[in-house]
Image (tube, rainbow, N blue to C red):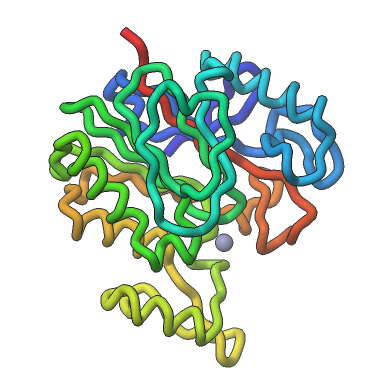
Amino acid sequence: MKIVNRNGLELCMFENLEDTGLVSHCFTTRIGGVSDGVFESLNVSYTRGDRKENVDENLKRLYVAMDFSQDKTVSGHQVHKTEVLDVDYDCCGKSITGYDGYITDKPGIVLCTFHADCVPLFFLDPVKKVIALSHSGWRGTAGRIAEATISKMNKLYGCSPEDILAAIGPSIGKCCFQIDRPVVEEFYRKIEFSKEYIEEDKSADGYFKADLWGINKRLMTEAGIIDKNIEVTDKCTMCSPDLFFSHRKMGEKRGSMAAFLSLKEF
Ligand SMILES: [Zn+2]
């Protein structure tokens, strides 16, 4: 993963997706917007309490930087579940509720999910020219949204997992993601191998640390994606408050980052 400056915005991008030349994508940081206070500066969410005109300007800068069309964006209210929506042009510009992942083969559509510690998962099948983007917090991770997304790409578009390129974006790392016993039990119940990615937190009795990047990557490889085709971030959102909003660090008073993924129009 690299961080590039476009139009004054610092944006995270993955080499494996960029190198195909087929998609435009990014994960936003806090850098380059006009919001202030807890929203400083590139908050891209209207639902956190930031002023509308600031979010408008932040998004305007982002759409210019990425050459995205705002009226072709698909986003919505995510619900920490594992439903993945197949998106067509008639979904654009609407706010959709109930989905944590989107899939499309339609060039120009901009898939968008919002994040502030939860894991963004990017998928591209360069053979079938299909993209998907999912929001995988701990509930989505335990619910196997990574697997659900790949399965839907296969069912709807005939994507072969061995062709798919994937990226796991900035989010809360194992260094910071502390969970309690009930959450651990839910992981163990839903994902057998999660035991290998959760360990006791030596600094806090009764607590554990979970590696959401590792679990999501393992879900991808078990679904057939080739290990070398998965790029994983090295940026923990909670460790880098200057660069990212973090729900765990800041609580409700914070802005949001977003992941964007779009098939180019040729
Ligand atoms: Zn951390």
Is 219 rendered above or below residue 266? below
Residue at 35% in and 81% down:
188
Towards the viewer: 261 or 143: 143
Residue at 61% in and 51% down:
116
Residue 224 at x, y percent in the picture: 16, 52
Relative horizontal placement of residue 120, taking residue 86 as reference (left or right): right
Residue at 45% in and 33% down:
13
Towards the viewer: 234 or 224: 224
Is 48 rendered above or below residue 68? below
Residue 6 at x, y percent in the picture: 58, 20
Residue at 43% in and 63% down:
212
Relative horizontal placement of residue 136, taking residue 149 as reference (left or right): right
Residue 88 at x, y percent in the picture: 38, 26
Residue 133 shows up from this direction: no
Q: Tell which quarter ligand 1 is in.
A: bottom right
Towards the viewer: 226 or 148: 148
Image quarter of residue 89: top left
Instruction: Give the position of the C terminus as an image quadrant.
Output: top left
In the picture as drawn, the residue positioned furthest to the top comes out as: 266
Q: How many marks?
A: 0
Instruction: Give the position of the N terminus as an image quadrant.
Output: top left
Is 20 rendered above or below residue 12? above
Image quarter of residue 198: bottom left
In the picture as drawn, the residue positioned furthest to the bottom comes out as: 205
Relative horizontal placement of residue 239, taking residue 46 as reference (left or right): left
Residue 216 at x, y percent in the picture: 35, 58
Residue 173 shows up from this direction: yes
Is 194 rendered above or below residue 153? below
